[in-house]
Image (tube, rainbow, N blue to C red):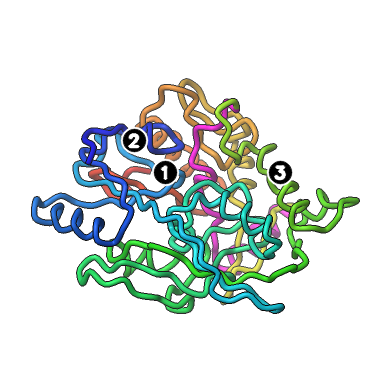
Amino acid sequence: MTTNVLFRELTTLEVGGAARRFVDLFSCEQALDEYRRARAQGWPILVLGGGSNVLVSDEGFDGLVVRWQDRRLDVLENTNERVLVRVGGGWVWDQWVAESVQRDWAGLECLSGIPGLVGAAPIQNIGAYGQEVAGLIRACWVLEWETGHEIRLSGSECAFGYRDSRFKRDWKGRYLVTSVEFELRPGGVPQVRYKELQQRMEGRPLTLSEVRQAVLGIRRSKSMVWDPADPNHRSAGSFFMNPIVESAQAEELVAEFPDMPSWPGGSGRTKLSAAWLIERSGFPKGWGEGAVGLSSNHVLALVNRGGARAADLIRLAGEVRRGVQARFGVSLHPEPEFVGFSRPLEELL
């Protein structure tokens, strides 16, 4: 166990105070030992993945921070129709995607370049360019802290939604995701549904490798690939989720703003583009001053330009959120998890 590890060394935003105690976990037995020790001492526990979807307060986290390191890769079934593979939660997500593409297993190629670890993928139900992990996850293996049992939860039990799952709601804090079962298509043809990706693929061979490279190219052009040489690299990716509103409200907005993008959001609801709303509310790419601002390549990314504090990012996020609310009457909700703050999220922003 290491003490007083700075979150700027553990997160892609590179802000936040110290983790009072930090440990890497390599087995369920070790995890349970650390959990029981923390409970006995009255320490709260934070499970940290790649640190790419979290904003930690300047006060840090006065408890135990754990990071799961299992990197198993077990092929459970491999037929002409499907391959079922169990992947350790400690795999770096993009390395696992690269491995699946190299093995000619279709399904994950459009999720290339997303930072973080495999164990975090089902919690957030990550998605991009027409793919979501919800459609590929058959089960999650989890360690239940209270009982000490490792159990298998089916994908349907996880109740996946847009950037959502039960792990973020009624299961929050109950489990540690140890591995994930994916069902992929061996030798499958990539399914390219997203318009921008379709345009990028024109004239290129429709292979998993080409789609992966096209996705990485798009993400790189938006500073959404981790690259220390990019001045926009200190971010948590998309800071705000695309808002889902009642379809009646969306129709009123589209009538007033005909160029507003919108998509079906399910059950009489409509999804809007957070990026479009932000830009039309007076916050262009590169907006901001001092140590924080919007990425010069993508308005959804709030960036630490160097030396920023968590309080600076909270102030920036609040200003953007209030601006969109005032202009369009739409509430934006942050995508990263907020850690170590004494006040509720709604009060912070």
Q: Is residue 3 magenta?
A: no
Q: Quadrant of the C terminus?
A: top left
Residue that mark 3 sits on: 218
- Give the residue type at disc 2: Phe
Q: Position of residue 212 (x, y in %)?
A: 71, 51
State the separation of the CA atoms marked 1 and 2: 9 Å
Q: Position of residue 184 (x, y in %)?
A: 63, 70
Q: Residue drawn 48% across and 78% down? A: 156
Q: Earlier in the sequence, mark 1 or mark 3?
A: 1
- Give the residue type at disc 1: Gly
- Give the residue type at disc 3: Ile
Give, as a single range, the part of the protein colored magenta.
230-258
How many neighbours does mark 1 have within 10 angstroms: few (below 14), some (14-19), or many (20 or more)? many
Q: Quadrant of the N terminus?
A: top left
Q: Secondary structure at mark 3?
A: helix
Label 1 close to label 2 by CB (< 8 Å): yes
Q: Position of residue 164 (x, y in %)?
A: 46, 64
Q: Residue drawn 91% across and 51% down? A: 203
Q: Secondary structure at mark 1?
A: loop
Between residue 335 and residue 317, name the one nearer to us. 335
Task: Examine the rendering and report whether any part of residue 272 can be seen.
Answer: yes
Between residue 153 and residue 167, name the one nearer to us. 153
Residue that mark 1 sits on: 51
Between residue 104 and residue 156, name the one nearer to us. 104
State the separation of the CA atoms marked 3 and 2: 29 Å
Q: In the rendered image of this protein, does residue 311 appear above or below residue 155?
A: above
Q: Earlier in the sequence, mark 1 or mark 2?
A: 2
Q: Residue drawn 44% across and 45% down? A: 50
Residue that mark 2 sits on: 7
